[in-house]
Amino acid sequence: MTRHFLKDTDLTPAEQEEVLNLAARMKAAPYSVQPFAADGAGRKTVAVIFDKTSTRTRVSFAAGIAEMGGNALIINPGEAQIGHKESVEDTAKVLERMVSTIVWRTGAHQGLVDMAANSRVPVINALCDDYHPCQLLADLLTVKEYKGRLTGLTMSYLGDAANNMANSYLLAGVTAGMHVRICGPEGYLPATDIVSAAEARAAETGGSVLITTDPAEALAGADVVATDTWVSMGQEAEKETRLQLFRDYSVDESAMAQAAPDAVVLHCLPAYRGYEISAGVIDGPQSIVWDEAENRLHAQKALMAWLMHHSGLAVVEGLAPVELVQESAQ
Ligand code: CP
Ligand code: NVA
């Protein structure tokens, strides 16, 4: 069965841990896993499609695919027929015959679902309006490096609590057994179906969910403090309103004073100093954002290798054996 990664809960708690452990192993030995190298006969291609702009995602996927023996085919916004001249379904049916994995940054999550439903190769969500699950793998890997564990830690997110990052912090955090607090103004909190999914996952892992409009409640004693831009891609027209809406939810020095003294700070970047985060915090000693950015590379390499292995399209040593499927044209 082909495995896809469209949202954080597509990995079970045990699978998420396996991917993070593989990421740590591959970070220490960057060329040790080669799912896209075809036994010396050539390189497999991964399609990396962008409907929205990117720096980290683009570079980390391209570098990671190359390090794993493959060829990254980057398709920039507006370059392909997908979405305007050709359906997602037809695009998937063509791509799966030529590439080994499809990575896609897009708007509506449903597009990713439709792509996956028509693809025998793994489909990876490289950010959509609702989730940014690859970012969370990197974030969790980084927190684990600094704190030595994830289970039982409190992770608090402040800001636009209805955006893709808030949803992913919630879902990925509870999957790791964390106590996740999501905080933003009324009307900008996670949707009820996402909160329900997070609560169900938390019940499995011993994690917990707190949704609040009160920054003090969210921040008290937190081990990890996270934020994201107040104006996500596609929301530029609402910029002025949003800068007012979220101004009490900034991760600045007074917010950090309420968290645990050894709290670490995450931001997926790009960051807007003086808005969702102060310069003093993002450039200060508690910030781990540069390691977080680097870990996009390691986490996504592990994810791609793991999905190839569990889809029966490659073998990664150290993972439980999976029967290989007959390859089509990739
Ligand atoms: N954090 C993140 O996804 O950055 P890019 O938009 O630059 O890829
Ligand atoms: N919430 C942001 C994340 C950017 C990586 C956006 O969607 O623009």
Image: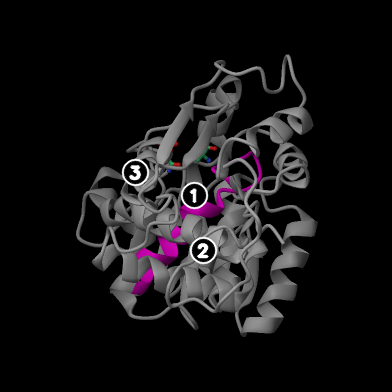
Q: Which x, y percent locates residue 91?
A: 70, 29
Q: Which residue is mark 2?
A: 306
What segment is highlighted magenta in the picture?
A: 125-144
Taking the image as shown, residue 300 lies to the left or right of residue 105, namely left
Precedes in sequence: disc 3 or disc 1: 3
Residues under labels 3 and 1: Cα distance?
A: 40 Å
Tell me: residue 199, above or below residue 105.
below
Precedes in sequence: disc 1 or disc 2: 1
Considering the image in quadrants, where does the N terminus appear?
Answer: bottom right
Q: Which residue is mark 3?
A: 66
Q: Secondary structure at mark 1?
A: helix
**Badge 2: residue crowd in 10 Å (few <14, some 14–19, many ≥20):** many
Taking the image as shown, residue 244 lies to the left or right of residue 209, namely left
Between label 1 and label 2, give the one nearer the viewer.
2
Magenta: main secondary structure equals helix
Q: Residue at x 55, y 23 (%)?
A: 236
Tell me which amino acid carries mark 3: Ala
Q: Which residue is mark 1?
A: 249
Tell me which amino acid carries mark 1: Tyr
Q: Which x, y percent locates residue 153?
A: 46, 78
Q: Residue at x 30, y 52 (%)?
A: 294
- Render colour scheme: one colour
Q: Which x, y percent locates residue 261?
A: 29, 74
Q: Secondary structure at mark 3?
A: helix
Precedes in sequence: disc 2 or disc 3: 3
Q: Residue at x 47, y 52 (%)?
A: 135
Tell me which amino acid carries mark 2: Trp
